[in-house]
Image (cartoon, grey):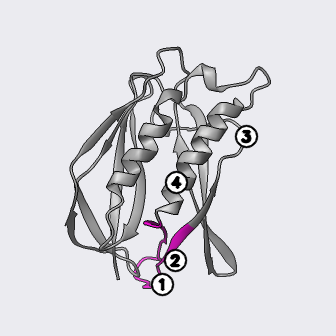
């Protein structure tokens, strides 16, 4: 079965750019819900951060990972952070996505890293401010509740056709700071 690959592009000023990749079943358009998610959490991010939610992208074969075509839906959406205070590039929070899927005796899960966040989201002890956790958890739960996103378990090896998709049924946001690393010098 074909699935949609939805690459949400990040522009982050200092620290460069990045991408958060989301997946949905072929005939399902989650771009409106992704816009709602990022709009809900934008106050935790500096004004230099923007997310570009595409109106088109690749479709891929769930089993093999091969590109099979393209999808088009909705209208492009660009959302900017609204936190006008300092931030540390590459640090932030993350969302864990849960599914009911099990592959090779392990639960199929996913993560979305949300970096960089502004300094106001951190407690003095290095954890996340309760209001930020609540806002992010609420936004993630609304995205899960739409029932449109899946986690794609990639094929186990090149040439194998054992990839699979699993509907996201839950989310959590740990009360800890995460950081992104780069291999670029």
- Distance between mark 1 and mark 3 Cα atoms: 34 Å
Q: Which residue matches tag 2?
A: 156
Pointers 3 and 4 in contact (C-beta within 8 Å): no
Give whichever of discs 3 and 4 has the lower sequence position.
4
Q: Which residue matches tag 1?
A: 162
Relative to residue 164, is residue 122 depicted above or below?
A: above
Q: Tell me the element at label 3.
A: loop
- Distance between mark 1 and mark 4 Cα atoms: 30 Å
Can you say which quadrant of the picture contains the N terminus?
Answer: bottom left
> Outermost residue, top direction?
85
Residue placed most toward the observer, 30 or 50 = 30
- Distance between mark 3 and mark 4 Cα atoms: 19 Å
Looking at the rendered image, the disc whose residue lies closer to the viewer, 1 or 4, is: 4
Q: Is residue 68 left or right of residue 149?
A: left
Q: Which residue matches tag 4?
A: 142
Pointers 2 and 1 in contact (C-beta within 8 Å): yes
Q: Is residue 60 left or right of residue 177?
A: left
């Amino acid at each position: 079965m074909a699935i949609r690959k939805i690459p949400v592009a990040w522009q982050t000023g200092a620290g460069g750019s990045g991408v958060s990749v989301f997946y949905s079943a072929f005939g399902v358009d989650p771009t409106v819900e992704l816009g709602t998610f990022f709009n809900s959490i934008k106050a935790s991010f500096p004004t230099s951060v923007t997310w570009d939610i595409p109106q088109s992208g690749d479709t891929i074969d769930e089993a093999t990972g091969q590109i099979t075509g393209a999808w088009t839906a909705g209208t492009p959406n660009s959302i900017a952070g609204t936190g006008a205070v300092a931030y540390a590039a590459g640090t932030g929070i993350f969302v864990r996505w849960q599914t009911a899927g099990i592959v090779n005796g392990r639960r199929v899960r996913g993560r979305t890293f949300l970096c960089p966040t502004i300094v106001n989201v951190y407690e003095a002890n290095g954890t996340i401010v309760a209001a930020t956790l609540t806002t992010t958890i609420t936004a993630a739960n609304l995205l899960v509740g739409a029932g449109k996103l899946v986690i794609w378990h990639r094929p186990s090896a090149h040439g194998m056709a054992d990839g699979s998709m699993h509907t996201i049924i839950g989310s959590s946001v740990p009360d800890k700071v995460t950081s992104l690393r780069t291999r670029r010098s």
